Amino acid sequence: MRPIIGFGAGGHGRVLLETILLQGEFDVVGFVDDNQDLHGRCVEGVRVLGGRTILPELLGRGVRHVFLGVGAIGDNHPRAQIFDHLCDIGFQVVNVIHPTAVVSKSAVLGKGVAIMAGVLLNCGVHVGNNVILNTGAAIDHDCRLEDHVHIAPGVVLSGGVRVGMYRHVGTGANVRQNVSIGSEAVIGVGAAVITDVQDRSTVGGVPARVLGRGI
Ligand SMILES: CC(C)(COP(=O)(O)OP(=O)(O)OC[C@H]1O[C@@H](n2cnc3c(N)ncnc32)[C@H](O)[C@@H]1OP(=O)(O)O)[C@@H](O)C(=O)NCCC(=O)NCCS
């Protein structure tokens, strides 16, 4: 099995670790995490080797693959910066797909995509780089998700929905078919989105209304 590390040993990283072990393709040789308190400790039986400064050394030892375990609730820029850094220095950020997820053969996936347990990805869906499709999300036909989007647990996107870069779609939100959701900021937990959402606007409620500008 090929060696792999996880970047980020928090909650999201632990969920991805379990999933990558289920995939059975990789030998997880450690976590990397910038939180010094974790260095030398074991998380779910996997040692935290150090912070990002040890990445070149790991590359030198032949570790080429990484899963990105840094989550986000709202602002996806920090995990986007880490994704770009990992790619720039030569790591391959792998897709992590839970065996219970249903992924259409015609779906197109970017790099570093995390597809959690129970996700449904229907035909013709396009998923950009470094997108999280969290537990039980349903993404219907022909949706298009740009880079660094986080779709939280239990979200339902009807057919043909577009979601712009860095956007967070909150837990349990439902989105009407063909709606276009601009980049950045948040769709609130439980929202019913029935009209287009502007860039950098936070919306919530049923039906969804603007709650504020920016995160
Ligand atoms: C929308 C959201 C970002 C707002 O968070 P916030 O800026 O901290 O806002 P507050 O909790 O201070 O609430 C501000 C106002 O918005 C309202 N509000 C907050 N969240 C709301 C939601 N989801 N739907 C409707 N109204 C909401 C509050 O009732 C409050 O109204 P008021 O000013 O009339 O009292 C947040 O509630 C949310 O839904 N985040 C997504 C979380 C998520 O998806 N987590 C999954 C992680 S995997």
Image: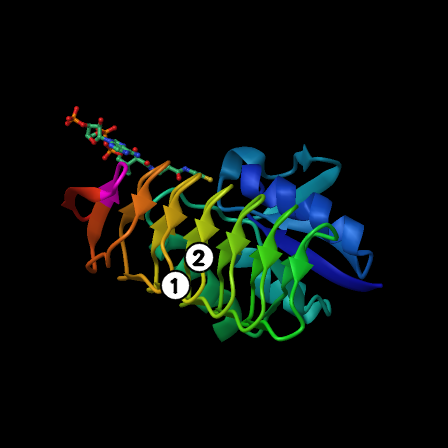
On the image, the x and y values in percent for residue 19 come to 71, 48
The residue stretch that appears in magenta: 203-208
Q: Amino acid at mark 1?
A: Val
On the image, the x and y values in percent for residue 201 come to 19, 51
Left or right of 123 in this view: 192: left
User: Is 7 located above or below residue 191 in the figure?
Assistant: below
Question: Would residue 215 be visible to someone looking at this image?
Answer: no
Which residue occupies 63% across, 42% down? 15
Which residue occupies 56% across, 70% down? 111
Along the line of sight, which residue is nearer the eye, 110 or 180? 180
The image's mark for residue 161 is 1
**Where in the image, quadrant-wise, is ligand 1 located?**
top left
On the image, the x and y values in percent for residue 209 come to 19, 43
Residue to which mark 2 is pinned: 158
Quadrant location of the N terminus? bottom right
Q: Quadrant of residue 58?
A: bottom right
Q: Is residue 207 magenta?
A: yes
Q: Are marks 2 and 1 in contact (CB under 8 Å)?
A: yes
